[in-house]
Image (tube, rainbow, N blue to C red):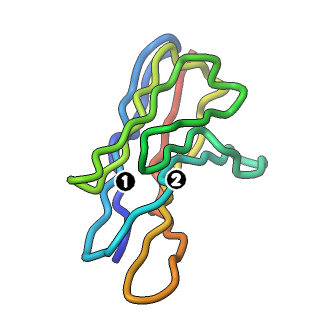
Amino acid sequence: VQLQASGGGVVQAGGSLNLSCSVLGSVFNIGVMGWYRQAPGEQRELVADINSGGTAIYGDFVKGRFTISRDNAKKTVSLQMENLKTDDTAVYYCHALLWGRGDPSQYWGQGTQVTVSS
């Protein structure tokens, strides 16, 4: 089982990007899914999380610019980012709490680079 993220890239300030993350492999259940980010020299921080019922939480810096969504049937989580700022430049990591045959485990994707130019 692994998470595969896609959708990063380079965009000008004020632009938009959509990140997507898929759960590859067989799982019995998926709990909270979401995104964290890490800029150079900074700690990893929460961008957005969403539970299986669709309830979402966002980092304070998002301020209504990002929208997280998930498709439980397709085992995917997406992050639509609008009005991007240079401060949003970071590596974005998706994560998910997955149940296999035993206790749940936290899985992380490989990270996708988002670069916002001025």
Residue shown at 49% from the left, 11% from the top: 14
The answer to which image quadrant residue 29 occupies is: bottom left
* Disc 2 and disc 1 in contact, CB within 8 angstroms: yes
User: Whole-percent x and y of residue 114?
Assistant: 49, 37
Q: On the picture, is 5 further left or further right than 71?
A: right
Identified at 38% across, 36% down, the residue is: 69
Judge by depth and name the residue closer to the eye, 74 or 2.
Answer: 74
Q: Looking at the picture, how far across and down is residue 62, in whole percent?
A: 62, 24
Residue type beneath disc 1:
Ala
Q: Earlier in the sequence, mark 2 or mark 1?
A: 1
Disc 1 packing (10 Å; few <14; some 14–19; many ≥20):
many
Name the element at disc 1: strand
Q: Quadrant of residue 1?
A: bottom left
Q: Position of residue 84 (x, y in %)?
A: 53, 19
Residue type at mark 2: give it.
Tyr
Above or below 12: residue 37:
below
- Please give the residue where the numbered disc 2 appears in the rendered image: 93
